[in-house]
Amino acid sequence: MTDASIISLYWERSEKAIEETDLKYGKLCRHLSNNILNNISDAEECVNDTYLTVWNSIPDENPNSFSAFICRIVKNLSLKRLEYVTAQKRKPEMLASFDELQNCISSESLPEDIVDAEELGKVISSFLREQSRENRNIFLRRYWYFDSVKEIAADYGMKQEKVSAILFKMKNKLKKYLEKEGYCI
Amino acid sequence: MKKNILFEAINYVDDDLVEDALSPKRDRNPGTYRFLAAAAVFTVIMAAALTFGIMNDSPVISIDNNTTVSYPDNTLSVPKSEAKRS
């Protein structure tokens, strides 16, 4: 079923909407949530909360990209849940991804109260649009979806070393780009 | 969790980019596409050249009074009388 048809079902308040969403995006949502939480039952709960959130959101919002919309919701809910679980349960992949990015920008030079994350997100989007599609997608698979280097390498038919090298170069480029845009003092 | 503004900002990357990242298959290098396109064009041109070349190299016999058995590049041109004899 197409995304537009699924959205129509939400508009009609048909419970089949959730069924179809789960059929099409359930696996992706569980994978993304599990990347963050490293716990299948927590991930399952987040996915169910996601469907409820989508159900409540759709009459007010008409997402252009349903897949991005649902992934964003499941990611945010999973990150919120992560704040409640113990550090031992955190998935190394997600934390590794988090640590890798910390070097791109100095948090001391960017106090959170003066930097708008949404605005910075737009700058990152502009940067990503200047990259090749493959590099851009690898970057997002790593830092948006928290996929492991191993998973990305398997999907793209590359060696893990190559994926790591691409990510390393992308991070350096991003750092320079952000500096150029005035995001480093 | 220690806050990282960049980490948070990535969450605001445009939807179309986030969606596109889900396409799992590896993209061919743009150079590969250019090479394949050039190869296709070259093949078509070569095929056309060979086809016309073969057609043009074939002896042509016209049926008017000046009939000659000739090749287009004038390497061989046989007068009508000789053509009849042969």
Image (cartoon, rainbow, N blue to C red):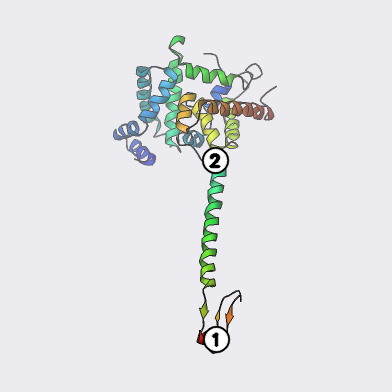
Residue drawn at 50 percent across, 17 percent down: A95
> Residue under circle 1?
B82
Q: Between residues A114 and A69, which one lies in front from this camera angle?
A: A69
- Rendered view: B18 above or below A91: below
- Rendered view: B77 above or below B31: below
Mark 1, other Cα within 10 Å: few <14 / some 14–19 / many ≥20: few
The N terminus of chain A - image quarter: top left
The mark closer to the camera, 1 or 2, is: 1
Mark 2, other Cα within 10 Å: few <14 / some 14–19 / many ≥20: few
Question: Percent x, y for residue A17?
Answer: 32, 34
Question: Percent x, y for residue A35?
Answer: 43, 21
Residue drawn at 53 percent across, 19 percent down: A98
Q: Using residue A50 as the reference point, say whether residue A159 is left or right of it.
A: right
Q: Using residue A86 as the reference point, say whether residue A126 is left or right of it.
A: right
- Rendered view: A5 above or below A35: below
Give, as a three-letter code, the residue at label 1: Glu
**Residue A32 falls in which quadrant of the image?**
top left
Q: Secondary structure at mark 2?
A: loop
Q: Between residues A55 and B28, which one lies in front from this camera angle?
A: B28
Taking the view exactly as shown, the residue that stands out farthest to the front is: B86
> Residue under circle 2?
B29
- Please tell me the numbered disc located at residue B8: none
* Chain containing the residue with disc 2: B
